[in-house]
Every structure is written in C-alpha cells, then in structure tokens.
Amino acid sequence: MQVPLLDLKAQYSTIKSEVETAIAEVMESQHFILGPKVEQCERAIAKYSGCEFAVGVTSGSDALLACLMVENIGPGDEVITTPYTFFATVGAISRLGATAVFVDIDPVTYNLDVSQIAPKITPKTRAIIPVHLYGQMAEMDPIMALAQKQELIVIEDAAQAIGSEYKARRAGSIGHYGCFSFFPSKNLGAAGDGGMIVSNDGQRAEKLKVLRAHGSKPKYHHKVVGGNFRLDALQAAIVSAKLPHLDKWTAGRQRNASLYDRLFAEAGIAETCSAKAASVILPKVVTNRHIFNQYVIRVSRRDQLQAYLQKRGIGTEVYYPVPMHIQECFAYLGCKNGAFPESERAAKETLALPIYPELVESQLQYVVDCIRDFVLESEPDGDPSKQAVGSRL
Ligand SMILES: Cc1ncc(COP(=O)(O)O)c(C=O)c1O
C-alpha cells in the first residue's frame, strides 16, 4: 500500500471543473494582476476569517514582510517570535534589519510558551509574531494582553492555520494583522505562490495596499518604498473556487485526526496506554478548532521511524529539523545550542503523518500498523534512547 504525505491530485479531481472555469474566466478577462478577482477573493477571505479587511499578496512570506514594513520595523527594533517555525517567520524580521528575539515553545502545542514572553520584552521590542503551528492557534489572550500593556504590534503567522479558532475567534482576527499562505500544500492552496493579510484596522489595510504596489499612491508617486507584493488574478480565482470546499476538507482532516487517535490507542502504543514503554505521543487539541494542517506525533528514534515508514510506502515529513536560533544564517544573533531546549527536542522527535482529507481508513490503519510494528521491534531493552518520550511531558 502507498500512503503519500499529501495527494493534491486526489483533491483536484473533485473540483477540476470549478477550478478550470475560474481559470478560463481570468484568461477571458486578460486581467492578471490585482483587479476584480483579487478583490472578490479578499472579500471572501476577510469574511471567512471574521475580519473587515484583506489584502492579497504574493506569498505568506511577503505577507509577514509587508506587515513589518508598514510598522516601519527595522534596525534597532526587536521582534519576539518562536524558533520552532518555518524560515519565513524569522527571515522577514531579519531581512528588514530588525532583531529576532526567541521564546521557547510549549512542548504540548509546539506554539510559543506565553509564560516566557514578558521577560524578553525590552524598550526595543516592537512586535510579537505568534505562529499558529500545524493548524492550532497560539494562546492569543495572554499575548494580546501583554501587547496592549507594552504597546506592541501582534502579527499572527497564520500560514498554516486558515479557519482555525481560539475561543471561537478565527486565526488572523485577533492580532493587528493575520498572515495566510496559499502555498499549494496548505489547506487552502493556490496553483503557485500566493498569500493574504487580514486585519480589522482599515488604515493598516490601506497602507498594505499601497505598499504591495511599490508604495505607489497616486500612481508613479511614492511616499514610501514598498515592493511588488501583488497577488495575481489566476491565484485569487483558484483560491476563491476552492474556498467553499475548505470546511468540508477541514472536517475530513479532523475526522482523520480522531481516527488516528483511536487507532493508536487500539494499537496500544499511544502515550496514554499504560502497557507500553515505547510510546507515541499524539497531538493534543487545546483550542476549539484545530484545522490539522499537519498531524504531528512525537517519538524517540524519529529518523529511524521515518526511514522504516518510507520503505513501506508511507510519506512523512519533519517540520522542522533545525530550529531557527541554530540556523547558520542567524548565528549573528548569538544563540547557542541548548538555548531553547523544547524547540530543539521537538526538532529531534516530531514527525508529520499523512492527514489529507481524501485518505481512507484502511490507509490510516496501515500507517498505525507500521508504526506499531516499529515500536514493538524496538521495545526497550535497557537502552535509554529507546525509552518513551512521553514521561517528560
Ligand atoms: C509558519 C509559516 N510561515 C510562513 C510561511 C510562508 O508562506 P509562503 O510559503 O506562502 O511564503 C509558511 C509556509 O510555508 C509557514 O508554514
């Protein structure tokens, strides 16, 4: 049996005619950059996210960059974020000459450990970028309370979290800005790069619109230096065609997550099963709507498990093997190995399993069976590296 990490063809076959119609409309209009299709997509994503405004941009990476640029964040400024994220979060801070200040993650949710933020705030701190990793939102209430008290900007990196909720509020709607990615493998993916920023602040949204077109307003007059961050109409039309299906796809991912939970428990290898020492720690849902961009387990001997599964036709991925504070290009920040132990541990132990909505139960059963075989073959034999990882959490 083959179980790929993601099968975009399976999804495309169910929406082919809608996507083709959307593409044909753009081709007929010959309007490729911004324009009515982008505006329509912006309205739809704003509504979906519980926000008043949305600004289509070239990617999730540029969404983050543009928000920081609107806030004039640059050299001498500090931005607090997590080291356990995709590169773009920290890359945006660094590209503007600002300093990323890291806060370690909560080992259960993999999101910022909010209890560690306050001590990192200095007079230079300008913003916080919480990342809603794997599709589950960070603890936004304490983050917003701190930000309000210290007059900081909050930019939600919601690239993996469109439609997720924290206390019934959608990702992107709580901070000053929310940034989405339409990278093809995201829950709502385009046919290329694309992104969007949502906000409830009209002035900020307006500034973003000017900035995404080289800061031009009126045309060919520039009060600020922006960039070419314009979303193109083909991507917007495809995203709009897919959006009505998103809740159904999210429900499919949530169903698969519950199924995994049950199958791991039945196999006797879930961390909660008392019998086995060598166990698998399952993702924990702590907010009210986790959209499972990824279903990430934690195991000891992760790399061996990944190779074992690959040999059996099962695709997995490590998000992310090297935390940002120990990336070569961020060595200038002076963070050492060991500085953020939970991020470093997660980077060694986490593994994303196939979770896409078109998977069927027999495929999930196969994944769990293979993991059980691996766990049983490596039952503890006195080697502490083979012991359960669960006992620490
Ligand atoms: C957490 C996070 N931030 C930012 C991005 C950047 O988005 P994009 O790939 O659209 O530039 C991604 C996408 O991979 C992401 O996962």
Image: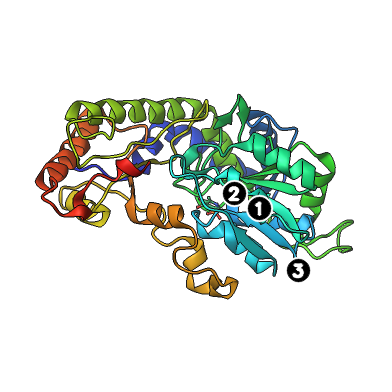
Which amino acid does the dot numbered 3 rest on? Answer: Gly
Q: Note whether 255 is above or below 16 in the view shown.
A: above
User: Where does residue 348 sit, x and y in percent of width and height?
Assistant: 34, 56
Q: Amino acid at mark 2?
A: Gln
Name the image quarter holding the N terminus: top left
Q: Tell me the residue that label 3 is attached to.
A: 76
| Front of the two marks 1 and 3 | 1
In this view, the residue in front, 2 or 123, is 123
State which tag comes first along the sequence, 3 or 2. 3
**Rendered image: mark on residue 206:** none
Residue with the mark numbered 2: 116
**96 horizontally vs 249: left or right:** right
Looking at the picture, how far across and down is residue 277, in whole percent?
Answer: 19, 40
Q: Are marks 1 and 2 in contact (CB under 8 Å)?
A: yes
Give the residue at mark 1: 119
Q: Secondary structure at mark 3?
A: loop
Mark 3 vs mark 2: in front: 2
Mark 3 or mark 1, which is nearer the start of the sequence? 3
Q: Amino acid at mark 1?
A: Pro
Q: Is residue 386 above or below residue 92?
A: above
Residue 345 position (above or below residue 266)? below
